[in-house]
Every structure is written in structure tokens, then in C-alpha cells.
């Protein structure tokens, strides 16, 4: 009888400990997911705000350009009007999209991220070719590109000397696979746990952004490699087409 009571008590305690452990882990995961979602909302807001500022600037400049062209036209200065329009065409090409991949959704993600990077005084270079139709879900590809850009920007912004900040993106089709190459400057060597790079945000986990990239690459049986040298971090990804 006593043994049965003790056994029941131990079982109850064990059940209680399991419940508490599950509750703790569940709350911890929920907090981290909430923080990750909040980070995404904040980044998206910052990107939209940056695009809005650019649009307002272009609208203001356009009014001035129209007034100048009207003045040349009214005075019959057709040569000057032609020169002005040629100069304006050159300027418009310079403020055009940073990169045109051929895929509208990928363009939207890359240009919003790269435009934001430029606004934060990060030197940007980008060259990308992406088919209009992909075997990879555009949502999954956006997850990869968005997180790659966010991680690269975060690393660059830790560098106090603005002239040392750079972010380079290269995307192309190589041997029937979509090849993604991102390299960025960084200040400190990243922390690692075994073969995993840890998030730069100071927490001890692998980082939801990095895990999201890993999961998508694994989903498509792709290739992922991360390397770092002094002051530089490189990510290479290959996804079957």
C-alpha cells in the first residue's frame, strides 16, 4: 500500500515536472517567435518608409524638371531642351531599380532590401538573373533572400566606418541550378557552435532567420555553405531548377 502511494506520488511529481518543462519550452518558443515576427514587421516598416521617402523625392524633382522643360520650350530653346532631356534620361537610369532579375517578386524583395542598405550608407553591388518560372516557390525564395539581406545589413551596420561597409549579391543560373552568392563586410568574427553559425543578435540559439534559410534549402535538397574570413562573410546557395 505504501509502495503504491509512493509510486503514485513519484508519478504525479514526474507528470508535474513534464508539464512545467513543456510549459517553459512552449513559452520560450512563443516569445522568440513573437520577437522574430516583431523584427520582421519593423524591418518591413523601415523598407516601406525608405521607399516612400524616395518616391516623395522623385515627385518633387519631377515637378522641377517639368517647369524647366516648359521654360526651354516656351523660349524656343530646342537644343537646350534636348540636352536637358538627355541629361534627365541619364539621371533616371541611375535612380532606376538597383537590380532587374526578370522575376517581379524577386525584384521587389531585392530592391527594397538593397535600397534600404544604400540609405544606411552600405556600398551595394548586385547582379541577378532569375527565371520568370521557378520550381522553387517564390515565397520560399523570398524567405532566403530576405533573411540573407537582413543578416548582411545587420553585420554591416556594426561597422562604425561607413566606407568599410559593403554588400554584394550575385544570382545566376549555373549548371541547371539557381546560384545565390552574398558577401558582406563584418566587424567581428561570427560565433559558431559546431558547424553552425550563431545569430548576431546576442542570443544563444541558431537564430530564426538562419534556421529559415536552412529549412528552405533542405526542403529542395539544395546546397548551402557559409564561410568567413577576416572582415568578410560569404553565403553560397544552390537550388535545383
Image (cartoon, grey):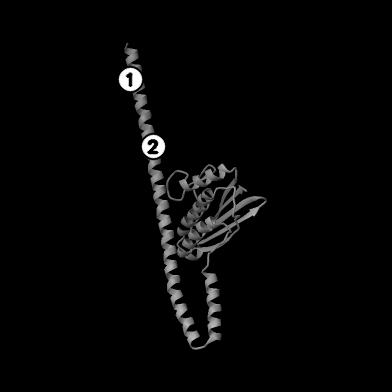
Badge 1 marks a residue whose secondary structure is: helix
Please give the label number shown on residue 9: 1
Q: Give the residue at the far top of this rendering.
A: 1
Q: Please state which of the two labelled residues, at mark 1 or mark 2, is closer to the viewer.
A: 2
The location of residue 41, given as percent across then percent down, is 40, 53
Res. 220 image quadrant: top right
- Taking depth in this image into account, of 37 and 153 the one nearest to the observer is 37
Residue that appears at 52% across and 55% down = 105
The location of residue 125, given as percent across then percent down, is 56, 63
**Vertical comparison of 214 with 67: above or below:** above
> Would residue 207 be visible to someone looking at this image?
no
Mark 2 closeness class: few <14, some 14–19, many ≥20 residues within 10 Å: few
Residue that appears at 57% across and 50% down = 227
Please give the label number shown on residue 54: none
The location of residue 176, given as percent across then percent down, is 66, 50
Mark 1 closeness class: few <14, some 14–19, many ≥20 residues within 10 Å: few
Q: Is residue 151 left or right of residue 20?
A: right
- Taking depth in this image into account, of 133 and 130 the one nearest to the observer is 133
Res. 101 image quadrant: bottom right
**Vertical comparison of 210 with 24: above or below:** below
Please give the label number shown on residue 26: 2
Amino acid at each position: 500500500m505504501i509502495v503504491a502511494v509512493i509510486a503514485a506520488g513519484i508519478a504525479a511529481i514526474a507528470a508535474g515536472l513534464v508539464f512545467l518543462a513543456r510549459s517553459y519550452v512552449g513559452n520560450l518558443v512563443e516569445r522568440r517567435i513573437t520577437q522574430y515576427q516583431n523584427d520582421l514587421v519593423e524591418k518591413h516598416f523601415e523598407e516601406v518608409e525608405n521607399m516612400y521617402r524616395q518616391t516623395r523625392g522623385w515627385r518633387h524633382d519631377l515637378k522641377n524638371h517639368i517647369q524647366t522643360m516648359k521654360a526651354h520650350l516656351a523660349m524656343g530653346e530646342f537644343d537646350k531642351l534636348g540636352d536637358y532631356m538627355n541629361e534627365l534620361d541619364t539621371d533616371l537610369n541611375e535612380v532606376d531599380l538597383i537590380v532587374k532579375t526578370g522575376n517581379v517578386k524577386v525584384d521587389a524583395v531585392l530592391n527594397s532590401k538593397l535600397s534600404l542598405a544604400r540609405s544606411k550608407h552600405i556600398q551595394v553591388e548586385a547582379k541577378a538573373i532569375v527565371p520568370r518560372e521557378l520550381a522553387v516557390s517564390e515565397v520560399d525564395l523570398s524567405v532566403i533572400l530576405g533573411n540573407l539581406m537582413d543578416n548582411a545589413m545587420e553585420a554591416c551596420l556594426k561597422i562604425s566606418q561607413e566606407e568599410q561597409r559593403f554588400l554584394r549579391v550575385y544570382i545566376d543560373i549555373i549548371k541547371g541550378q539557381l546560384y545565390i552568392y552574398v558577401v558582406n563586410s563584418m566587424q567581428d568574427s561570427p560565433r559558431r557552435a559546431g558547424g553552425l553559425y550563431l545569430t548576431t543578435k546576442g542570443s544563444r540559439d541558431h537564430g530564426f532567420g538562419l534556421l529559415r534559410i536552412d529549412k528552405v534549402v533542405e526542403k529542395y535538397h539544395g546546397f548551402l555553405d557559409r564561410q568567413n574570413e577576416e572582415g568578410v562573410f560569404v553565403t553560397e546557395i544552390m537550388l535545383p531548377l
